[in-house]
Amino acid sequence: MEAAKLLKSLEKEDFRILMAIEIGMKRSEYVTINNIKFYSRYKMEETLFRLNKVHKFDLIIRNTSKYEIAYNLNSKAYDLLALHTLVKKNVISQLGPLIGKGKESDVYSCMDDNGKIYALKFYRMGRTSFRNIKMYRDIIGDRGHLSWLYVNRLAARKEFEALTKIFKLKLNTPKPIAYNRHVIVMSYLRGKELVYYKQIKKPLKIFRRIIKQIKIIYQKAHMIHGDLGEFNIVLSERGNILIIDWLQWVPSDHPNANTLLERDIINICHFFQKKFNIESNVNEIITSFYK
């Protein structure tokens, strides 16, 4: 990852300039040099020197279309700021290889000072298209100006809060370790998503375990995954499962709660029936959730 390689190349003054732009982006898409100077509390000479340096590292985007030159952060700079903070807080010390890539996120392995391995999830919402703004309405609310970097920050916070709530039930969901900006650090299970298995041992046992997990989460945490399927259930070779990707979760009193819950259940039932020939009574399972 490019951002990780730059960590040792930047000085604390460079990070301060990037953070000054980040602050300014809460108010406008591009931040003027005068505002960057104000937020960083540097003299103009130092501000210009640092801006020139981080621009050469391809961390900021320059806009010269207006009467005053202005800048904003690109995704690489945002990655860098998050990694810098997580390293500084001793949450992680090394970044490993990319282990998963989706429409809205990239997942890397990482390690702390004690050699413990975690999963590091970078949100990339808006990477493919910004048209589906309705998908993000539950996250962004009624905010006016909103940069896509900040949308990803809100997404990470929403999933981290969900994982924190669910983990208290001691189920098969990732343990939340920390989050910063658009990045979540969580426990790592060596395995792969269900969709990539041609066959598994004891599929009926795995199926029942998944149904039991989402039932407990619904009945005790009052939460619905909202996007459950074979792509977001990780299975290890030992038969352990991990239900991931909780961005689209909704509370059980959500207007569409029943529809979303039933869709999750139907998705799992149909997948196991089609892929592993596991027959189930979908209506009976759905009814058991409401008891």
Image (cartoon, rainbow, N blue to C red):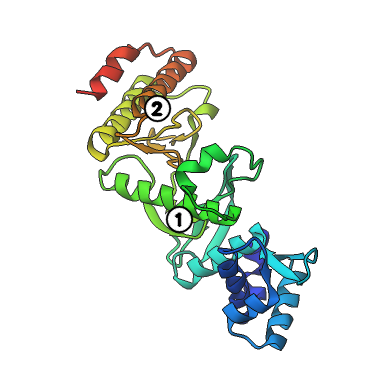
The label on residue 196 is none
User: Is residue 247 placed above or below 290 in the rendered structure?
Assistant: below
Q: Is residue 118 visible?
A: no
Give the residue displayed 44% in from the left and 70% down from the top. Answer: 90
Residue 236: percent from the left, percent from the top?
A: 44, 36
Q: Identify residue for label 1.
A: 185
Graded by Cα atoms within 10 Å as few (under 14), some (14 to 19) or many (20 or more), the crowding at tag 2 reads many
Mark 1 belongs to which amino acid? Val
The quarter of the rendered structure image containing the C terminus is top left
The quarter of the rendered structure image containing the N terminus is bottom right
Calculate the distance from the C-alpha at mark 2 to the C-alpha at mark 1: 27 Å
Residue 273: percent from the left, percent from the top?
A: 43, 14
Residue nearer the viewer, 135 or 243: 135
Residue 4: percent from the left, percent from the top?
A: 62, 63
Q: Is residue 215 visible?
A: yes
Mark 2 belongs to which amino acid? Leu
Q: If you read the primary sequence from the N terminus, does the residue marked by circle 2 or circle 1 appear first?
A: 1
Q: Quadrant of residue 56?
A: bottom right
Helix, strand or loop status at disc 2: helix
Q: Identify residue for label 2.
A: 260
Residue 7: percent from the left, percent from the top?
A: 62, 70
Helix, strand or loop status at disc 1: strand
User: Is residue 91 placed above or below 138 in the rendered structure?
Assistant: below
In the shown orientation, is residue 6 left or right of residue 212? right
